[in-house]
């Protein structure tokens, strides 16, 4: 029993998607939140969601670790999403370009964050307007910038995927009852293990961020949704809790947050 709260199904080869989903469901994965990179993702995710209703929830947005949308492109995307307000979906993956920005700064290159902040604000406003969950790529100091926007627009449901950041940011996320998801690197990454140990269990979910590859016991393996089963087991071990109960609680968190099932 598990939910993959963040996976890029559209980034797998065409002939891998259906077998991947089928095998995951057979293994006990009861839900998958399929996030977007941008417009090209939308048709793929919409088709998968219609094929697997209740199992796959699409999330529509523009990933921040790529050039931001031009104003007219952003308006068109927001309008496209609004037109589907009667369908089940989330907003995502959206956020801020931490890795692009820090790489540019390390190389002494200029980096203008303003258009990324404006883009994120537009998606946050949309999430508030439609009262939809929003899946965020916002780590380290970018988490605080995202939280400023979420609080300003009183967003009820925000999900910080693969979160990394300060204790102060974690406290702020918890105070807002926002969610944090844990990836397979909880099996070997001290920073993520500490997070899994200390965030209130009711605010945790599991994810793979597939097809992103992992190290440790997953080195050289394709990232698949059922890896969240191992994530749930490891969280239970870290916290000294029963595996079955912990897995059920983590899955219930994701189902409640995203309205899956």
Image (tube, rainbow, N blue to C red):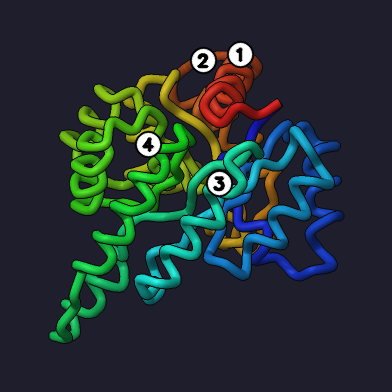
- Mark whose residue sits in front, 3 or 4: 4
CA gap between label 2 and label 3 equals 24 Å
Mark carried by residue 245:
1
Q: Residues within 10 Å of mark 2 (few under 14, many from 20)?
A: some
Q: Which residue is mark 3?
A: 6
What is the secondary structure assignment of the residue under circle 4?
helix
CB under 8 Å between discs 4 and 1: no
Q: Residue sitting at 69 percent across and 55 percent down?
A: 45
Is tag 4's residue or tag 1's residue first in the polypeptide sequence? Answer: 4
Q: Quadrant of the C terminus?
A: top right
Q: Residues within 10 Å of mark 4 (few under 14, many from 20)?
A: some
Q: Which residue is mark 4?
A: 128
Quarter-wise, where is residue 105 in the image? bottom left
Q: Quadrant of the N terminus?
A: top right
CA gap between label 4 and label 1 equals 33 Å
CB under 8 Å between discs 1 and 2: yes
The percent position of residue 30, horizontal first and vertical second, equals 73, 31
Please state if 205 lies on the left or on the right of 195 as rendered: right
- Mark whose residue sits in front, 2 or 3: 3
CA gap between label 4 and label 2 equals 35 Å
Is tag 4's residue or tag 2's residue first in the polypeptide sequence? Answer: 4
Q: Which residue is mark 2?
A: 241
Is tag 1's residue or tag 3's residue first in the polypeptide sequence? Answer: 3
CA gap between label 1 and label 2 equals 8 Å
What is the secondary structure assignment of the residue under circle 3?
strand
CB under 8 Å between discs 4 and 2: no
């Amino acid at each position: 029993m598990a939910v993959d709260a963040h996976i890029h199904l559209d980034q797998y080869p065409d002939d891998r998607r259906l077998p991947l989903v089928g095998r995951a469901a057979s293994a006990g994965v009861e839900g998958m939140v399929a996030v977007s990179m941008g417009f090209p993702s939308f048709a793929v995710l919409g088709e998968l969601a219609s094929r697997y209703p209740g199992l796959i929830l699409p999330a529509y947005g523009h990933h921040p670790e790529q050039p931001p949308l031009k104003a007219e492109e952003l308006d068109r995307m927001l309008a496209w999403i609004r037109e589907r307000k009667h369908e089940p979906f989330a907003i995502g993956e959206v956020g801020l370009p931490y890795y692009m920005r820090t790489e540019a700064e390390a190389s002494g290159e200029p980096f203008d964050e303003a258009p990324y902040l404006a883009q994120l604000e537009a998606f946050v406003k949309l999430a508030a307007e439609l009262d939809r969950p929003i899946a965020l790529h916002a780590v380290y100091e970018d988490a605080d910038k995202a939280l400023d926007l979420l609080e300003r627009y009183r967003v009820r449901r925000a999900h910080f995927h693969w979160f990394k950041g300060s204790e102060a940011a974690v406290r702020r996320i918890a105070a807002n009852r926002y969610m944090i998801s844990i990836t397979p690197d909880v099996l070997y990454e001290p920073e993520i293990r500490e997070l899994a140990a200390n965030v209130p269990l009711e605010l945790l979910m599991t994810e793979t961020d597939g097809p992103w590859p992992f190290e440790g016991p997953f080195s050289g393996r394709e990232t698949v949704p059922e890896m969240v089963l191992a994530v749930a087991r490891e969280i239970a071990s870290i916290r000294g809790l029963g595996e079955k109960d912990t897995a059920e609680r983590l899955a219930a968190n994701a189902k409640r947050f995203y309205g899956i099932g």
